[in-house]
Amino acid sequence: ILAQAILARFGTSAWAPHPPPNSSSPHTNTPVRRDNMSEAATDKLPAAERKRLKKEAEAKKREEEKEKKRAEQAAKQEAAGSKPAQTNMEDLDPTKYRENRMAMVKAMKDPYPHKWPVNASIPALIVKYKDMPAQTQEEGTEVCIAGRVKNKRAQGANMVFYDLAADGSRIQIMCQAQHHQVGDFKESHSNINRGDIMGVRGFVGKSKTGELSIFPREVKLLTACLHMLPKDHQGLKDQEVRFRKRYLDLMINDDVRTTFYTRSKIVNFIRHYLDSRGFLEVETPMMNMIPGGATAKPFITHHNELNLDLFMRVAPELYLKMLVVGGLDRVYEIGRNFRNEGMDMTHNPEFTACEFYMAYADYNDLMDMTEELFSAMVLNIKGSYKIQYHPDGPEGEPIEIDFTPPWPRISMVDEIEKKAGVKLNRDFSSEPARKELDDLVAKLNLDCPPPRSSARLLDKLCGHYIEDHIVNPTFITEHPQVMSPLAKWHRSKEGVTERFEMFVNTKEICNAYTELNDPERQMACFMGQAAAKDAGDDEAQGVDHEFVTALEHGLPPTGGWGCGVDRLTMFLSDKNSIREVILFPAMKPLGK
């Protein structure tokens, strides 16, 4: 395929043969390669393709050099009258390694056993026998374990050592011919390599050095790994490979497992907190007729049976509030949302969020609950209110983030006015107010692509004056109504709502407000969003008549709250990229 592409682009000159020595060709003095592309043709290829071809050539050269050395060594041994040493599988080219392993598997009678009777876990054995004295063995108690071989080393013909890993722990397997009972000792171990899944049946003991070990009576290859894995001391650092092959990342990098255990602890803590306060966990539709509940650009899918385009949900908010209308006073959902927006260090097109709705509560109650929930969570998971975080990655300088309550509460518009030294027109839906904001954003040279609506301009000003200066948990409160179409108007301040966002180190973690339950005002807010959409704002919400009808049946005074689980995990696992805390993050196709 590559050859056809090059021929189509550069013609046959890319493989032009050398002219005969006495040729009168005008190109006799031009250096041309016989089997490879000309340098001119190579230079015209994309940089990525040139890099790939260079790597292939270097790998081929290294393999040829290795093969030459092996042949020389074998020749020397043969001349000396000794038998050539068996080829070390780890020295083979990865392609040759895979071919050899596949041939080995085909030659085996039962390469993929159906079961191995595991009766103990490695972590449990480590805890149980941690105080066993060195050079002691408990031959009367038989254990049966399994795991992945992380390392293999032989010591003579009658002893083989393995490092076996499972459940986040490792244990040494000390194989001695004297204890082996099932099959031939040498044959049993010849087929087991680094990366394989291995079953071990034997007894527990400790070596001379005091290392806890299993002394096998039987070992069995349960599943062969056909690919050569990176060695422990090398690790797996390439992010593209790590994220595309997360299974390999989990095999090689122990800290990745810890990250996703932390994520699970966060979700479980939220669920326990809400369950213990009388909330009901529910599930709502992932596909909607209208992409409501948040200001975001939706994904579109198609329902074949209905012959209808539907939107993947950007938030479950409207359905959850309908349940409150129906009498489920405290409901929550933890699940996926989908937003067809950019990908960067803190954004992924699909992400996990928790939303809850609590009848007869307002945004002040929810701020108190947020402080209590997150401060207790951090203390429970990290052992302290203060955590170390590396915003620029593990090689960068750490910062300290203090989750000790209470947290600062900053009124958005008041703070912008204070920092900018101006008094803003609070009728943000009017053109004079929008023009005033536009002039201020232009004066500060802040980037705000069209449409330059009041909501988008206010968001830029908030980022500049407030969000970018936050490190410790802080509430930004009282957002303007034009930014909050689903939030209730403030009971004492004109033009703003009873809403807050909680930020940590410049990043939004949660968003909450006293819910707008006046159907007439809700319809007016929806119409304003529809006008913004018509003006070119593809993130604006549409008009959801069904939701307004539900409000007409009576939504009690309610507080609503939403939190991004992925970003919260980033802080508690000390990761500066959202792709590190999502098992299978969105990736661009290879070669694009």
Image (tube, rainbow, N blue to C red):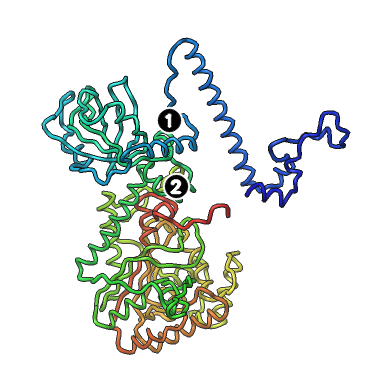
Q: Residue at x 22, y 31 (%)?
A: 182
Horizontal and vertical percent for residue 579? Answer: 44, 54
Horizontal and vertical percent for residue 270? Answer: 27, 62
Q: Residue at x 49, y 56 (%)?
A: 587
Q: Give the side of residue 324 with respect to residue 394, left or right.
A: left
Depth order, front residue of 372/327: 327
Depth order, front residue of 575/351: 351
Q: Residue at x 42, y 78 (%)?
A: 305
Q: Is residue 537 above or below residue 163?
A: below
Q: Is residue 29 above or below residue 402?
A: above
Horizontal and vertical percent for residue 308? Answer: 46, 79
Image quadrant in which you'd find residue 56: top right
- Amino acid carrying label 2: it is Arg
- Amino acid carrying label 1: it is Met
Q: Nearer the viewer, mark 1 or mark 2?
A: 1
Q: Reading the chain from its start, which is encountered first: label 1 or label 2?
A: 1
Which residue was labeled with disc 2?
242
Depth order, front residue of 167/321: 167
SS class, disc 2: helix
Q: Residue at x 56, y 26 (%)?
A: 65
Number of numbered callouts drawn? 2
Q: Give the side of residue 208 with respect to residue 81, left or right.
A: left
Q: Give the side of residue 30 with respect to residue 385, left or right.
A: right
Q: Quadrant of the C terminus?
A: bottom right
Label number found at residue 89: 1
Do the CB atoms of the residues marked 1 and 2 lie less than 8 Å apart? no
Residue count near mark 2 (Cα–Cα under 10 Å), binned few <14, some 14–19, many ≥20: some
